[in-house]
Image: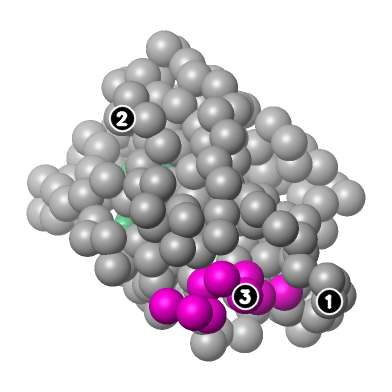
Amino acid sequence: MLNSSSETLQFFRAWLSEPFRVAAVTPSGRALAALIVSEISAETGPILELGPGTGVFTRALLARGVAEENLALIEFGMEFAAKLSVDFPRARTLCMDAARLRDVELFDDGPVGAVISGLPLLSMAPRRVYSILEGAFAHLCANGAFYQFTYGPRCPVSRPLLDRLGLKATYLGGTFANVPPAAVYRIQRRRIPRIAGSRARSTTADNS
Ligand SMILES: C[S@@+](CC[C@H](N)C(=O)[O-])C[C@H]1O[C@@H](n2cnc3c(N)ncnc32)[C@H](O)[C@@H]1O
């Protein structure tokens, strides 16, 4: 799906007012959206999306068969959160900092099956990235994955941070059909916790 010109304009205005938060001049394109949701299906379970912006990845998730009720959208920008609430009324939209995710209740019936992140991790301090990942993995089921895109040449989560959290990153693919070209990484726990079911927490992360 192509971005509408009003969405592109809204995005550009948001970037002008807060370039470090928005970190892109235009919403992601169709190819990147298709890539980041490529391993998601209706069977994945509830999905947590971080930094949805104007909802490009959100629409791609719906196209993969995810029910709108099964989406929790975490967006810091008030302008984007307001639009998301209107465009996806049955999703749970929270206007908040993704670094404060850990203690938020998302879904009544258990953990999420995957996290889709459009957050600009490269422009964030390592401590903030740590809090985001720790919080997201506290909500993820034992074998769930965190999908992150980047404009950089490698995974935007550093090796020391992955080690500290007991995580591993795998390159999923890249696309030149995006402005700028982008790549997607799948981040997962190195070891699946023995106690699956209710909220699985990475034991390594708790040692920090
Ligand atoms: C690069 S844009 C990506 C937007 C959209 N996912 C896309 O691909 O078009 C980054 C998004 O993350 C949001 N964001 C930045 N920092 C955030 C934070 N700490 N918590 C939640 N959202 C944040 C921005 O407001 C913006 O919507």
Q: Which residues are magenta?
A: 200-208
The quadrant the N terminus occupies is: top right
Residue for badge 1: 195
Q: Which mark is residue 152?
A: 2
Check whether the beta carbons of the residues at disc 2 and disc 3 lie within 8 A of each other. no
Residue 39 appears at what percent x and percent y?
A: 73, 36
| Disc 1, SS | loop
User: Along the horizontal axis of the image, is 206 left or right of 155?
Assistant: right
Q: Residue at x 52, y 72 (%)?
A: 205
Q: Is residue 4 visible?
A: no
Residue at 81% from the left image edge and 59% from the top image edge: 45
Going from the N terminus, do you reach mark 1 or mark 3 first?
Answer: 1
* Residue 206 belongs to magenta span: yes
Inter-mark Cα distance, 1 to 3: 11 Å
**Residue at which label 3 appears:** 203
Position of residue 87 relative to residue 94, above or below, is above
Amino acid beneath label 2: Gly
Q: How far apart in space, not on screen, are marks 2 and 3 (Cα)? A: 29 Å
Label at residue 142: none
